[in-house]
Amino acid sequence: MPSDANSGGVLADVTTVRDVVGGAVAPARRASPSEQVLLDWLELHLALEGRLDHDGTASWKHRSVYELVAAHGRWFTPAALPAEVQALPERQCFANAAATEQEHPHLAYTEGFAVADGSPVPTAHAWCTDANGYVIDPTWSDLGGSAYLGIVLPPTLRPRAPRNWGVLEAPDSLYRLLRDGL
C-alpha cells in the first residue's frame, strides 16, 4: 500500500519521466520538496558535467551516471515495506535490494538516486519496485525514503560479491552502460 506521508499528502505519480527540463528529468506532476531537492541536485551535476572536456568518451552514449539516470530514469512512489519483506541492515542497499529481489521474484531490482526522509542530500541508492512502480526499500524501511529516481536494471546486471558495489557505481558495469547504453 502506498504511503503519501512524505509527499505532503499528494501521492506521487508513477508515470515514466521523459519530460526533459534543462537536461534533467522532471516529474510529470508538481514535484514534492524531496523530489525537488533531488531534481536540483541532478541538474547541478549535469550542468557541471557540461563544462568538462569529454574527448576520451565523446563517442559514448552517456557521459556520466547522472546523464544515464536523467535519460532512462523514472520517479518511483515511496510505499511502506510490506509485511512479507524483511528489513535489512543500513549501508548495504545494493546487496539488500538484490537479496530482496531473489527472495521475492515479483519485485524488480532498481538503482538510481534517492533522498531519505528529512535529509537534504541525495545519494546513490538501490531498492526494489513492484509492478505498479511502488518502492519496496528493505534498507530504508524505518527511515522512509521520500524521493526515488532510478532505473529498473535488467536481470543480468546485479551487484557482485565480495564488494556488492552498485551496478551504477562499479567501473566494470558502469563504463559499459555509459559507453553502450541500456
Image: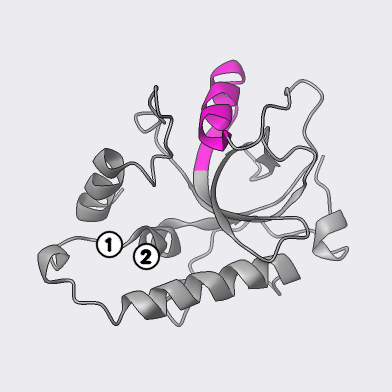
Q: Is residue 165 above or below residue 160?
A: below
Residue 112 visible in the snapshot = yes
Structural crowding at the residue carrying mark 1, measured as other residues with C-alpha within 10 Å and reported as few (<14), some (14–19) or many (≥20) = many
| Label 2: element kind | helix
Q: Is residue 39 above or below residue 68?
A: below
Residue 20 visible in the snapshot = no
Image quadrant containing the N terminus? top right
Residue depicted at 66% across the width and 66% down the height: 35
Residue depicted at 50% across the width and 45% down the height: 111
| Label 1: element kind | loop
Question: Which residue is labeled 1 in the image?
Answer: 62
The stretch drawn in magenta includes residue 106: yes
Residue situated furthest top in the rendering: 103
Q: Position of residue 2 (x, y in %)?
A: 80, 45
Q: Quadrant of residue 128?
A: top right
Q: Position of residue 110 (x, y in %)?
A: 52, 41
Q: Is residue 118 above or below residue 88?
A: below
Dot placed on the residue nearer the N-terminal end, 1 or 2: 1
Range of residues picked out in magenta:
92-110
Q: Is residue 165 above or below residue 78?
A: above
Question: Is label 1 in contact with label 2 (beta carbons under 8 Å)?
Answer: yes
Question: Which residue is labeled 2 in the image?
Answer: 67
